Amino acid sequence: MELLLAITIGAFVATGSFMLMRPRAFSVVQGFVLLSHGVNLLLVSMGRVQLASPPIVGDAADAIADPLAQALVLTAIVISFGMTAFVLVLAYRSYQQSGTEHVDLGGKHV
């Protein structure tokens, strides 16, 4: 289970980082979303990865997950949603002014 989670986190972060460097605004937004999902999965995996156990208190004392990581992920989800909305509005405004969705206009200032 941990190997699959590590591969998934690595794929999200690698793909998100690659797409953030693309010249189109929509690819940048997709890269930002994938990167935030990878970071959220990393934070969840830092708490404890255990199947079929309650999130906070279980029957045995060793089946307790760390609720701090879950609280951090909830905060990170809200922040990433707000940032995604901001980046989408910024990309749309840039498209309205420049007429293209390219992030880098090749030194041309609009």
Image (cartoon, helix red, strand yellow):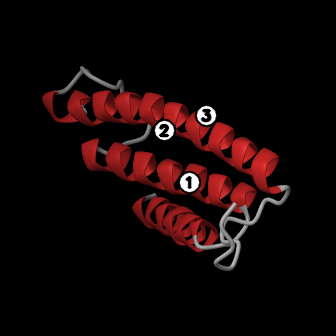
Rendered residue at 40%/60% (across/down): 2
Mark 3 sits on what residue? 85
Q: Amino acid at mark 1?
A: Phe
Is label 2 in a helix, a strand or a loop? helix
Rendered image: mark on residue 32: 1
Rendered image: mark on residue 22: none
69 over 71 or under it: above or below: below
> How far apart are labels 3 and 2 at the CA level?
9 Å
Is label 3 in a helix, a strand or a loop? helix
Q: Amino acid at mark 3?
A: Ala
Q: Position of residue 50 (x, y in %)?
A: 36, 43
Rendered residue at 51%/31% (across/down): 82
Please give left or right for residue 3 compared with residue 94 in the image.
Answer: left
Q: Amino acid at mark 2?
A: Ser
Q: Is residue 49 visible?
A: no
Rendered residue at 71%/50% (across/down): 94
- Given this view, does label 3 or label 2 mark the residue nearer the observer? 3
Q: Quadrant of residue 72?
A: top left
Q: Quick one: label 3 or label 1, which is nearer the N terminus?
A: 1
Q: Position of residue 89 (x, y in %)?
A: 66, 37
Mark 2 sits on what residue? 80
Dot 2 and dot 1 residues touching (CB under 8 Å): yes
31 over 55 or under it: above or below: below
Q: Quadrant of residue 6?
A: bottom left
Residue nearest the viewer, comparing 37 with 100: 100
Is label 1 in a helix, a strand or a loop? helix
Q: Position of residue 5 (x, y in %)?
A: 47, 59
